[in-house]
Amino acid sequence: MPRPETRMVTLSIDGREVTAPENVMLVDGAKYGDVEIPVFCYEPKLGAPVGACRMCLVEIEGIPKLQTACSTPVKDGMVVHTQTARVHAAQEAIVEFLLINHPLDCPVCDKGGECPLQDISFGWGGGRSRFIEPKRHFQKPLALSPLIAIDRERCILCYRCVRFSQEIAEDYQLVLQERAAHTFVATFDGHPYVAPFSGNIIELCPVGALTSQPYRFRARPWDIEGSGSVCTLCPAQCNVNFTVRDERVLRVLARDHAEVDDGWLCDKGRFAYQAVHVDERITRPMIRDGGELRPVSWERALEHAASALGRAQARVGAIAGGETTNEEGFLLQRLVREVLLSNDVDSRAGGSLSLDLHRALGAPAAQATVSDLEFADAVLVLDCEPVDDAPILDLRIRKGVRRRRVELAVATSRPSSLDPNARLRVRFAPGCAEAFLLALEAAIGTAAGEPRREEVARLAQAAGADAGAVHALADLLTTSGDDVVVLWGERVTGGERGEYAGRALLNVAGRLGLRDRDGAGLLCVPAGTNGRGLAEAGVLPNAGPGLSEVEEAGRDAAGIAAAVAAGDLVALYLLHTDPLRDLPNRGAWEAALDRASLVVAHAAFLTEGIRAHADVVFPAESYAEKEGTVTHPDGRLQRLRPAIGHQGETRAEWQVLAELARRLGRDLGVHTGPMATDQLVAAVPFYAGITLDELGGKGLRWPAREAASAFPAPATAGPFELEPPAPAPAPNGRLRLGTFRSIWAAPEVEVSPALKFLHPRQRAELSPADAQRLKLFPGDRVTVGSDGHSVSAIVALRDGAPEGTVFLETAIPEDSASLLEGPLVEVRKA
Amino acid sequence: MTQLILFKDIDEPGLATLEVYQRRGGYEGMRKALGMSRDQLIAELEASGLRGRGGAGFSMGKKASFIPKGTMDKYLVCNADESEPGTFKDRELMQKCPHMLIEGMIIAAYAVGANRAFIYIRGEYELQAQILERALEEARGQGYIGEDILGSGHSMTLWLHRGAGAYICGEETALLDSLEGKRGNPRLKPPFPANQGLFQGPTLINNVETLATVPHIIRMGGEEYAKLGTPGSTGTKLVSVSGNVRNPGNFEIELGTPAREIIYGLAGGPHEGREVKFWFPGGSSSPVLLPKDLDLPYDFDSMAKAGSMLGSGAIIVIDDANSVVDVALKTAKFYRHESCGKCTPCREGTNWTVRMLERIDSGEATPMDLDIMASVQEQIIGNCLCVLGDAMAMPVGSMIAKFREEFEAHIEAARERNDALTTAVAPPEALIQGAVA
């Protein structure tokens, strides 16, 4: 779907000529002429205007009644008056009406000082009230949820929060109860408003009716400073604004970026800032001494790490976690490759892919952008759950479906929260994306007139999918229009057959003609925040910076675990990762960590693996302290800027890596953060010429720059000749194991006082049919086991879950599904 | 009386059944219409000059002509949420002659190419809903509703939907929201229902009486119908007369009949020894008129010229035994209760007005409050999302303007009454010390 073109029109507002884009609402058009028209209910992010507050009434020549400027599109030759006596009278009337039931408790209200109601009363109100009756009273404040307090007396009933819940997040929880002057905002069932995106209503509220529980009474607007940066808690990399008071982050607000987050934040991004200032955070270097980690000086920690790494020389494996910046990743691979002379460095959880495949999947020509999700003809969500993996994309997809009638198809193993919005849902067995994609490719061929129905049936069966649904999907993707975006989860290319699944994906992309097409393409949701940036910075066993060839490929993450366990490697360098938490196959990692003679970790929290196994721990910076860049899944380099000083004794991590290298006898030539960026840019040909200034506050997509032509071309981008994979195992009374990582599975959620209540416990998601067969009910405790390992879980029924499959969570401290090997498990009542 | 159209056979026993209705010429209009082209039908409707009978008085033919041509999901909705205080004409029409409405809807749906039609009837009309359901069954049984109606190629479904008791759902866009299963709140216009109405599809929405008139227009011909009434207000109108009259009820009149003839002639005038003090010409939301206006012709334009409106044709007569403050308070309370709360002026203005009127009534007001109240009415009028706010502000505003002296006298009398009470129970010292509130 092509983006709408903008034509400019000229109109007159208060006698001055204003040129504004056609069809924008008058409120927005007026801004082009520096005319401000006050609004409360209007918020373009919420979609079509509702015209409820009536604050924006203006006079338009030729129309007898005053019109709401929020709902009147600008037209050529329109003559508008915003300063006539009639308009003033109407605006003063609305302010007077709004204030008659408002408590005017500004001195004790959190919103005071940054409150649109205050500003508009001051700017457009009459400055007096004639209302002498008693005001409306409600019990207050009430907890709308553990995160949000609601003061119904302050509420001006502008509908914003309700519209957000109904039309943006589509959680359908908030409604208006009662009517007339008794109207109030509430959840439809009286239960707390708990939803992944609930916090956005705090920011939407134009008065102090909805306030953040964690921020309540912590600061006034004149105490605070704003500091823009990027949230690195997930790959969505939303742009945020930290509210800082006295070197403490007290709040996170959205920093609207239409190409990244569309102005929304998830509750993790909004409230997990608390983790920056909790006692659990590591802010001093530590060394294991007598079996316990004890704080030591930087000098001792660095010396200890340097000498031990020096002894391990070449027998070191390094893993970078998703929150590592491009610069840190770049310096890590330099440290490992140039100083420690090892090739074993990785940043991917799911195993290594061929360099060619990396190049083919990451090629600028195949790349879709975030906003393409909204303007595409069709979107295929493939083996990922946006609300868990990159939450803000979930809202973007909903927006496309709701406002632009994007045809949405969801092809996953686990049911998705987008299922109700999708035209088509296809389920396949966990880990069978390869067979599914081959079936899809064949089905697209069938749609193009090739007689491959039998092949589709065979492959669909191997994938545990319904062949009819695969054909329907092929139809949808080939007939909806040319702009198709495939949002695929990194787990597609995980596991032993990941390489082939990646090729199958490329085949499908080729069949759909997604390459070299603006508005279409592939968009990967990596497992870690900066998955894309780390690959491009060279944190892969088989690729250097810029996805360049390396002389000798090293071991991937699983290979490192096996080599350490076997004694081939002796030391582990863990940059922002706890393998027991973040990586699959916990058993193998437990063995490796037990055997390793040295484990150096950069960590912010003592998660189980770090607590039990690290020998040297360097305190990791929080994202509010970091300086550097990260790369968005669609290729946008974004800049992290420190909002606060380093907490405790924390140091910049580029500095720690450079210092270690120096102590090991090599000067990496990095003395400031920007120098690290310069080195990275110089080493990655397709980043050539990028400067921090150029990135600025909005970042920059490298695939859209000229230097992108320097991207190394793959030997072939398909089509590949692919063999059909082995079929999905038949459950035979047991269940197939699928895993997922919840949006709330993060140490930051665990330690943030406000979010703690959301931190997940293991639950076994089952289809109602399986539960009935196993005589299980929601809330039952079960043991899920395979090959001698087992975890304990609570049964949760999920409509739309495929029969014969159980889904368990990973990345949680206890009973993580990474303990189980699968692919089949047994579920028994505990 | 003049030639009766809608109420010609209204008291015929069994008119609610298909058999009697057809014996009286029912469904002939439909048969004739199905033989005509859609453009012809709309031309007939425009020629008839029929103006909407629900309250706004917009030309029915013009509204139908706004519905886009072409094949798409188009809807016809009958607004049977008759909730305006004083209005009860649709009730009688649906109760006694449901087929007339159904026939009108079939013709209207055919004229605009709508395949799905709904009757949204107010929840309190349970008996009328049952009667309509029975009539619908009969019509379906005859093939008047369904696939390929009488071989015309036109198909339609027609469903009856019962409201849940909100006045605001008589506002057309709130009605559509309610019909879609949402909270009944008015929508912003534009887009108008003719472009984006029910389920986003083009929608023709008309009052019961308007639709019931359609078969007659088709039978008579639009031009013939237009000969009735006055040039700006053609045809006949059902008026519901209530209040202080001897013979309240529904009457069909030719538009342009003097109001005095309706109130004194048909409804019998006020009771023995009483005088008309003022009257609402078009339901409780119309500005009140005085006895001197009784000789005006009762039609859309004359009422508008007199500063009021014909509205739904509900005349409420108030005689001189009533206090205007009482009437204003009851009126305002009704609209405060029924305001949906979506837009600011209506939600807050109706509430504030009631509070002030209560103070006036209880003697806690001063004449200055009358100025404030009058100004609040002005702040409401024209500034709301829909016309509910105006529906309170216009009559209340007109009462203050026309009966200001009575309001002032009422304030004074109530204050004196209060003073008498306080001096009787409390000694003056206590008052000075503020011991008595």
Image (spheres, coloured by chain):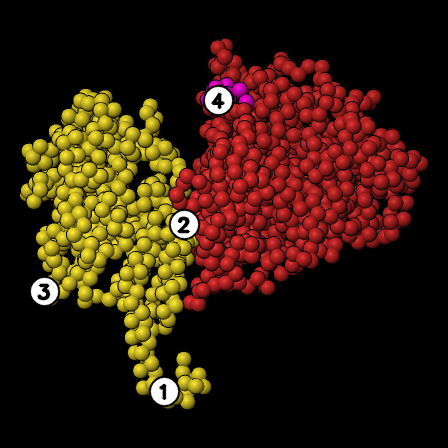
* Residue B272 circle label: 3
Residue A356 in the figure: left or right of residue A410: right
Task: Name the residue beneath numbered marker 4.
Answer: A480
Name chain A's colour. Answer: red
Amino acid of disc 4 = Ser
Range drawn in magenta: A472-483
| Local crowd size for mark 1, using a 10 Å CA cut-off: few (<14), some (14–19), many (≥20) | few
Q: Residue at x 91, y 35 (%)?
A: A667
Q: Secondary structure at mark 4?
A: loop
Task: Name the residue beneath numbered marker 2.
Answer: B383
Q: B432 above or below B162?
A: below
Amino acid of disc 2 = Asn
Among the 4 quarters of the image, the one containing residue A390: top right
* Residue A373 circle label: none
First in residue order: circle 2 vs circle 3:
3
Q: Residue at x 73, y 35 (%)?
A: A695
Q: Which chain is yellow?
A: B
Label 2 to label 1: alpha-carbon separation: 47 Å
Q: A516 above or below A343?
A: above
Q: Are marks 3 and 4 on the same chain?
A: no
Residue B335 % position (x, y) = 32, 56
